[in-house]
Image (cartoon, rainbow, N blue to C red):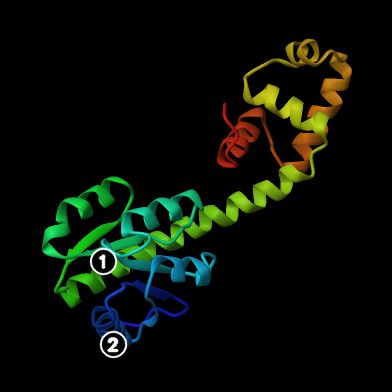
């Protein structure tokens, strides 16, 4: 198995378990970075690079569940697979409910894990593409003037030009000019296009 450009991050405070996974995955042609704690991962993680994260559920300091929450808060696009001891299965199930892709009990079934890593990398590709698109949209939105942004919010709320004009206390003609300019900057062909873009960028309807 060779996944060019992908980095598998192994996070486990148990050195033997960490190095065992690193050796197994490395022997299959995967690039692996090992981390002894969640804090070490967060300090070194490049979440713009294709990959996934294998994290132990129970670790001193920041646990696997707390790490998952932090990664979600950072909008990290790398999928997380949890590794757990038998007694930690309920905690691992909670991790799945919180967004982890899957969990494996120790000792890990190597071939099953590799198949799940393949799935994780496919998912990562999709999520990185979304992140790139969101970044491009954010760049476009940053070019809007404050007034154009206000008009955009009005369009997002489903308001007509004359309603936006009344809301903002400006003329209908001024709204039309701002709307034309913001549509041009956003490369939006219609109001529906613009609304989809703004929602994709994280604006609330």
Q: Is residue 71 above or below residue 28?
A: above
Nearest the viewer among 38 and 83 is 38
Image quadrant where one finds the C terminus: top right
Where is residue 123? Give x, y as percent. Answer: 38, 59
Horizontal side, residue 65 vs residue 137: left or right: left
Helix, strand or loop under label 2: helix
Residue behind mark 2: 23
Residue drawn at x 68%, y 26% as measured from the top left? 153
Residue ID at (50%, 69%): 45
Q: Residue 190's image quarter? A: top right
Viewer-side residue, 12 vs 203: 12
- Which one is nearer the viewer's eye here, 178 or 44? 44
Q: Which residue is mark 1?
A: 116
**122 with respect to 135 (left or right):** left
Q: Is residue 91 above or below residue 113?
A: above
Q: Is residue 139 left or right of residue 6?
A: right
x, y (%) of residue 48? 54, 65
Q: Residues within 10 Å of mark 2 (few under 14, many from 20)?
A: few
Residue 92 appears left or right of 79: left
The answer to which image quadrant residue 113 occupies is bottom left
Residue 32: mark in rendering: none
How far apart marks 1 and 2 lie (CA) works out to 17 Å
Quadrant where the N terminus is found in the figure? bottom left
Residue drawn at the location 18% of the way across and 71% of the way down? 112
The answer to whether residue 167 is above or below residue 126 is: above
Q: Residues within 10 Å of mark 1 (few under 14, many from 20)?
A: some
């Amino acid at each position: 198995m060779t996944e060019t450009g992908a980095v598998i991050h192994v996070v486990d405070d148990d050195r033997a378990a960490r190095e065992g996974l690193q050796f197994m995955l490395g022997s299959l042609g995967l690039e692996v970075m090992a981390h002894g704690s969640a804090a070490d991962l967060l300090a070194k993680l490049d979440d713009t690079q294709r990959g996934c994260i294998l994290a132990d559920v129970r670790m001193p300091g920041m646990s696997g569940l707390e790490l998952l929450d932090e990664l979600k808060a950072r909008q990290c696009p790398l999928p997380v697979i949890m590794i757990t001891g038998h007694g930690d299965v309920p905690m691992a199930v909670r991790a799945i409910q919180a967004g982890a892709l899957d969990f494996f009990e120790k000792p890990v079934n190597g071939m099953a894990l590799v198949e799940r890593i393949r799935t994780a990398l496919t998912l990562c590709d999709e999520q990185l593409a979304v992140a790139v698109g969101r970044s491009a949209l954010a760049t476009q939105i940053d070019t809007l003037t404050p007034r154009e942004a206000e008009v955009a919010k009005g369009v997002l709320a489903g308001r007509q030009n004359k309603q936006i004009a009344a809301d903002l206390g400006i003329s209908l003609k001024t709204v039309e000019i701002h709307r034309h300019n913001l549509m041009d900057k956003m490369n939006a062909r219609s109001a529906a296009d613009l609304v989809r873009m703004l929602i994709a960028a994280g604006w609330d309807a």
